[in-house]
Image (cartoon, helix red, strand yellow):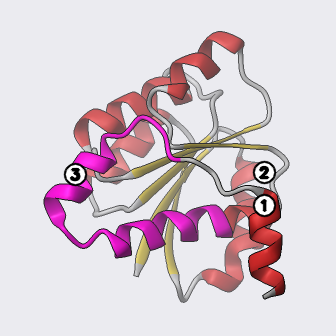
């Protein structure tokens, strides 16, 4: 089962994600944390595939969290899901996040983004190649036109 950790300091956002992603509970193992420190503690206790984090977090902002995740767990895909962040924090996240999604983000976009991350990992079965690519600073996003054409086909 795919394991994803969602990090946001607002419990209402985490509750919304739980409701929005409830239909995927049989495909994804999901955990939720309200701070960067809580996220790191959760990651230490399990084998996660993806971290989806807000940029504004108490104590440790999202950029700092993703930098620590990148250093300690380079194989984890790192996604920013944020509505507002300072320009400075966003620029710091550019080097550590693989993808940046803006709030509000609909469930289909979030699911497609996470599924693409898993599909890429499935294609790259070579463990040493996965480690090298996991340290990549960014992953290109698919153009919307391509996604629409693929859906239509």
Q: How far apart are marks 2 and 3 (CA)?
A: 35 Å
Q: How crowded is mark 1: few (under 14 residues within 10 Å), some or many (20 or more)?
A: few
Q: Is 64 on the left-hand or right-hand side of 19?
A: left
As drawn, 110 above or below 66: below
Q: Is 95 on the left-hand or right-hand side of 132?
A: right
Query: What is the magenta range?
Result: 112-139
79 in magenta: no
SS type, badge 3 = helix
As drawn, 15 above or below 147: above
Q: How crowded is mark 3: few (under 14 residues within 10 Å), some or many (20 or more)?
A: some
As drawn, 47 above or below 85: below
Q: Mark 1 points at which residue?
A: 16
Q: Distance between the residues labelled 1 and 2?
A: 6 Å
| Residue sitting nearer the eye, 8 or 152 | 152
Which image quadrant: the C terminus? bottom right
Chief secondary structure of the magenta portion: helix
Q: Mark 2 points at which residue?
A: 12
Residue 85 picture quarter: top right
Q: How crowded is mark 2: few (under 14 residues within 10 Å), some or many (20 or more)?
A: few
């Amino acid at each position: 089962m795919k394991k994803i950790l969602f990090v946001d300091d607002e419990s209402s956002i985490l509750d919304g994600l739980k409701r929005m992603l409830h239909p995927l509970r049989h495909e994804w193992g999901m955990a939720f944390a309200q701070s960067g420190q809580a996220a790191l503690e959760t990651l230490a206790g399990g084998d996660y595939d993806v971290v989806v984090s807000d940029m504004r977090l108490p104590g440790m902002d999202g950029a700092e969290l993703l930098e620590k995740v990148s250093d300690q767990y380079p194989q984890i895909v790192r996604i920013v899901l944020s509505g507002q962040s300072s320009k400075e924090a966003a620029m710091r996240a550019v080097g550590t996040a693989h993808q940046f999604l803006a709030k509000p983000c609909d469930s289909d976009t979030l699911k497609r983004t996470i599924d693409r991350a898993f599909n890429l990992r499935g294609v790259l079965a070579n463990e040493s190649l996965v480690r090298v690519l996991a340290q990549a600073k960014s992953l290109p996003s698919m153009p919307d036109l391509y996604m629409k054409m693929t859906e239509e086909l």
